Amino acid sequence: MHTSPVLQYLKKHGQKLDSEIAAATGISLSEVRLSLADLSAQGEISKCSVTKFNNGKPVEGFLCRISGYFPPAAPGRKPANK
C-alpha cells in the first residue's frame, strides 16, 4: 500500500495546518484538503477547522495531526496524579 505524501509529512513534522502542508510538499491546497478528508475518513489523522486572522482578514483552514498522537507534556507541568 502506498503512503500518501501528506501522511508522510505529518508523521515527520507533527501537527500542521493544511496550508503549511501544501507549501512544504508542493501539492496544491485543494489536493491537500482532498487527501486530508480521505485520511480523516480512514481514521489515519485527526483534523479540526481553524480560523486564523492575517491583518484582520479571516483565513479558514484545517489543523491536522496523526491520530492517537499526544504531544509530550510541557516542561514544568505538575503530575496529573498527586
Image (tube, rainbow, N blue to C red):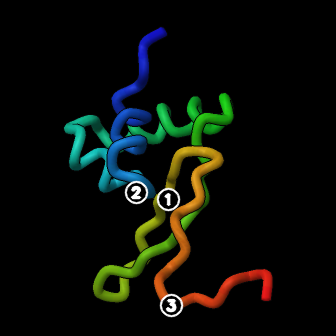
Pick whichever of labels 1 and 2 is earlier in the sequence: 2
Residue identified by numbered label 3: 76
- Callout 1 touching callout 2 (CB < 8 Å): yes
Q: Amino acid at mark 3?
A: Gly
Q: Amino acid at mark 1?
A: Leu
Q: Is residue 79 left or right of residue 4?
A: right
Residue drawn at x 41%, y 41% as measured from the top left: 11
Q: Is residue 18 above or below residue 36?
A: below
Residue sitting at the far front: 82
Residue drawn at x 40%, y 38% as measured from the top left: 32
Mark sitting on residue 63? 1
Name which quarter of the figure residue 70 lies in.
bottom right
Q: Is residue 78 left or right of residue 11?
A: right
- Callout 3 touching callout 1 (CB < 8 Å): no
x and y percentages locating residue 65 in the rendered image: 51, 51
Residue drawn at x 34%, y 44% as measured from the top left: 12
Q: Is residue 41 left or right of residue 39?
A: right
